[in-house]
């Protein structure tokens, strides 16, 4: 069976406004099988989100090809759901309208879509928040609405761009466990971008490390030998977790330092 | 400074009472033998109040209020519809926007009052020349806001909508349109205010009815009490309209976080 997502020798570059080009990602090859949970970890500004946008079809690579189920991707990736780092909910729609919108624009009547959306709100623990507007929800609640909004369409592939980035540590843990629960119900292929190595190891089947940009490339690919089901908080106490964490961190820390120096030590 | 709703209202009333009392005293009693505010130029509160009561008692004022209201509402509706449509069109077609850009700037920089005589010439002394003047004011406010609203749609929300499978038409309806409308509504106070300004200024420059006409007629015969009475009725009229706009705004923008609580 063809991989759910396969990136083959993908180069990504941007034209700079002052002339010249910025080479963001060089020669990235990555394959994600159906049902596999893969995290991409790298220092700030290494182009990992850019790589995710190629898999989503939001940007086209300068060279190389992205294949979805073996077929080259042209335009948007219709098989994928995308959870964004920044707030992506429609601020003028209530939680339930936000969750239902993906079904309704696909032609499902409200009589069918609203009960489904209510059910999904329940699954992310927000059953009583259906009529709230996004600004009335906390950051974690908004992320959960976003998750329901994406998952209700039952995409084959789930792309996540530091979705829990802006949340506090406790909320991240709760969200991580909730994500694993939802994912284990019908294992989608997941690409999860993060700069948090612990989070990546705790969640994933595989962790892929990218070098610092520009011209970032993939420098490591680890299979995580931890049993499922997992609990994000408990698994971090497991000796096997520490062993793999130490091994990956050895490789990652040089890149993090390079990225830190290059971005002037800023965020 | 935080104060209770009640004491705030009390202070607001107090300011008004003192101002009117001062006005009354200075126009009625000489200070060291000199009338600080000669009644011929400043009238006095009693005369003005009597005039206002007379207008309402005789019912003559209603016709003028109705004319001004009609003109302002028509100017608001026509200017808003035009502003929304053109703003949308320009924002979605950058080439068109670039071509018309200098002309839009030119038209907006023009003081609209100079157009009033031309509108009177074209459209006569009736309400439509005033509506036209109001439209030229309202249009640009709504136009710039809608243009900005469509241009500044969050890229993340837009990408999210695309990834959720929306086509161009659905993007219009679910993303661009609500965003543009929210910008338009945020300028509602300004655009409604300008619709009234257009109507009153138009009437002032030549009309047969309306609050502006009333004030202009009073000025023509040095009837200062009439001028002040007209101004007070106009002020009250504008405040009532502004309150109605606030109510409508609160209904339409429920989804927006309450950032600016300045309007109590």
Image (cartoon, coloured by chain):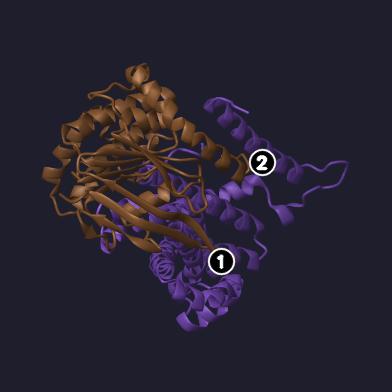
Output the chain of dot 1: A
Whether residue A103 is visible here, answered yes or no, is yes
Name the mark on residue A20: 1
Front residue of this view, candidates A199 and B182: A199
Relative to A156, say whether A233 is above or below.
Answer: above
Relative to B191, say whether A235 is above or below.
Answer: above
- Residue A256 percent location from the top left of the image: 53, 38
Residue drawn at (27%, 28%) of the image: A178
Question: What's the colour of chain A in the image?
Answer: brown
- Residue A54 percent location from the top left of the image: 35, 55
Q: Which residue is mark 2?
A: B20
Residue drawn at (45%, 75%) of the image: B95
Front residue of this view, candidates A21 and B129: A21
- Residue A199 percent location from the top left of the image: 38, 29
Whether residue A96 is visible here, answered yes or no, is no
Front residue of this view, candidates A198 and A146: A198
Q: Secondary structure at mark 2?
A: helix
Output the chain of dot 2: B
Q: In this rendering, which labeled residue sits more in front, label 2 or label 1? A: 1
Picture quarter with the C terminus of chain A: top right
- Is the residue marked by circle 1 packed among few (<14), some (14-19), or many (20+) residues within 10 Å? few
């Amino acid at each position: 069976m063809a991989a759910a997502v396969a990136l083959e020798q993908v180069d990504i570059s941007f034209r700079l406004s002052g002339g010249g080009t910025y080479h963001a990602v060089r020669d990235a090859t990555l394959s994600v099988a159906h049902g596999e949970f893969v995290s991409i970890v790298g220092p700030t500004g290494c182009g990992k989100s850019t790589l995710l946008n190629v898999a989503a079809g939001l940007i086209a690579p300068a060279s190389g090809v992205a294949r979805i189920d073996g077929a080259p991707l042209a335009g948007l990736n219709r098989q994928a759901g995308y959870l964004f780092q920044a707030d992506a909910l429609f601020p003028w729609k209530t939680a339930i309208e936000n969750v239902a919108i993906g079904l309704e624009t696909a032609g499902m009547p409200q009589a069918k879509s609203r009960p489904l959306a209510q059910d999904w709100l329940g699954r992310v623990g927000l059953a009583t928040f259906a009529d709230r507007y996004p600004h009335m929800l906390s950051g974690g609640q908004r992320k959960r609405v976003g998750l329901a909004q994406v998952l209700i369409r039952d995409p084959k592939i789930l792309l996540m761009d530091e979705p829990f980035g802006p949340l506090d540590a406790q909320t991240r843990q709760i969200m991580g466990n909730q994500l694993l629960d939802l994912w284990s119900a019908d294992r989608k292929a997941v690409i999860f971008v993060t700069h948090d190595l612990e989070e990546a190891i705790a969640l994933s089947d595989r962790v892929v490390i990218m070098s610092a940009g520009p011209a970032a490339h993939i420098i490591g690919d680890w299979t995580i030998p931890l049993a499922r089901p997992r609990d994000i908080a408990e698994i971090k106490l497991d000796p096997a977790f520490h062993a793999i964490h130490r091994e990956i961190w050895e490789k990652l820390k040089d890149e993090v330092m390079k990225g830190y120096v290059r971005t002037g030590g800023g965020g | 400074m935080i104060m209770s709703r009640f004491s705030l209202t009390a202070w607001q009333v107090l300011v008004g009472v003192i101002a009117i009392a001062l006005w009354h005293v200075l126009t009625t009693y000489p200070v060291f033998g000199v009338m600080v505010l000669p009644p011929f130029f400043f009238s006095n509160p009693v005369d003005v109040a009597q005039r206002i009561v007379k207008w309402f008692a005789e019912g003559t004022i209603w016709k003028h209020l109705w004319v001004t209201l009609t003109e302002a509402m028509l100017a608001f509706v026509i200017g808003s519809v035009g502003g929304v449509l053109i703003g949308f069109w320009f924002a979605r077609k950058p080439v068109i926007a670039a071509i018309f850009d200098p002309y839009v700037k030119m038209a907006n920089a023009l003081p609209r009052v100079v157009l009033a005589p031309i509108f009177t010439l074209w459209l006569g002394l009736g309400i439509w020349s005033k509506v036209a003047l109001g439209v030229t004011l309202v249009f640009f406010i709504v136009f710039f806001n809608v243009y900005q609203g469509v241009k500044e749609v969050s890229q993340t929300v837009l990408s999210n909508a695309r990834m959720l499978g929306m086509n161009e038409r659905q993007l219009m309806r679910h993303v661009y349109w609500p965003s543009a409308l929210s910008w338009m509504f945020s300028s509602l106070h300004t655009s409604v205010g300008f619709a009234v300004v257009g109507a009153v200024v138009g009437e002032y420059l030549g009309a047969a009815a309306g609050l502006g006409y009333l004030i202009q007629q009073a000025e023509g015969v040095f009837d200062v009490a009439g001028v002040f009475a007209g101004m007070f009725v106009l002020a009250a009229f504008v405040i009532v309209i502004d309150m109605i706009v606030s109510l409508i705004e609160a209904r339409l923008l429920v989804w927006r976080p309450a950032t600016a609580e300045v309007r109590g």
